[in-house]
Amino acid sequence: MHKFFELGGEVGVLKASPRCFRAKWHRSASRSPSLSPVAFAQDFVGSSTELSEGHPAYDSTVGATARFQRNYNGKQPGDPKKAAQAIVQLTQERNLPLRLLLGSDAYAAAEKNHFARLEEARIWKKLSVSTDFETR
C-alpha cells in the first residue's frame, strides 16, 4: 500500500508524517513509501471541474488560485503513465525510500526547501549546539 502526500508536506504544510516511524519501517518488510506527486496531466482542474473566481473580496487569494489552476491546466510536466510505471517499479525494489518525489517540479520544490532549511540551521548552529551538556 502506498500513501500519497501532496508536496505541501515537503514545503511547509504542517501535518502528521510517517517520518517518525522510519526506524520501525526499516525493520519491517511491509514498509511502503509515501509518494509526493505534484503537477501531472489529468483532469483535476479541467472540464470536469468548475472553478469559480469567488467573491470579489477574495480575488487576490481565491480568484488568483482559480486563475492559476485554469491557466496551468494542460501544461503540467508530469506524465501520469510514467508515474504509474514508477509506482509499479517500487513494488520490485528491496530498499524503498521513505518518500518518493514524483515529477521534476516536485523534486525542484523539495530540493529548494531542504537547502533553505539547511541554510537556516547553519545560521543557528551555534545556538542549537550550545544546549548540550558540557564535556568533561
Image: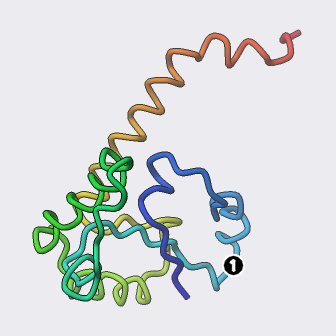
| Pick the front one: 42 or 59 | 59
Locate residue 117, reporting x and y percent.
47, 33
Locate residue 8, reporting x and y percent.
46, 56
Locate residue 70, reporting x and y percent.
18, 67
Q: Is residue 110 left or right of residue 72?
A: right
Q: How many marks?
A: 1
Is 110 placed above or below 86 here?
above
Locate residue 109, reporting x and y percent.
32, 49
| Pick the front one: 49 or 133 | 49
- Residue at horizontal 26 percent and vertical 52 percent from the top: 64
- Residue at horizontal 41 percent and vertical 88 percent from the top: 92
Quadrant in which the C terminus appears? top right
Task: Farthest residue to the front: give it.
Answer: 56
Circle 1: element type: loop
- Residue at horizontal 33 percent and vertical 40 percent from the top: 112
Q: Which quadrant holds residue 114? A: top left
Check disc 1: other Cα within 10 Å, few if <14, some if 14-19, many if 20+. few
Quadrant in which the N terminus appears? bottom right
The amino acid type, in three-letter code, at marker 1 is Ser
Q: Which residue is mark 1?
A: 28
| Pick the front one: 7 or 19 | 7
Is 30 placed above or below 78 here?
below
Q: Is residue 104 left or right of residue 130?
A: left
**In this figure, which colouring scheme has been used for the structure?**
rainbow
Q: Which quadrant holds residue 55? A: bottom left
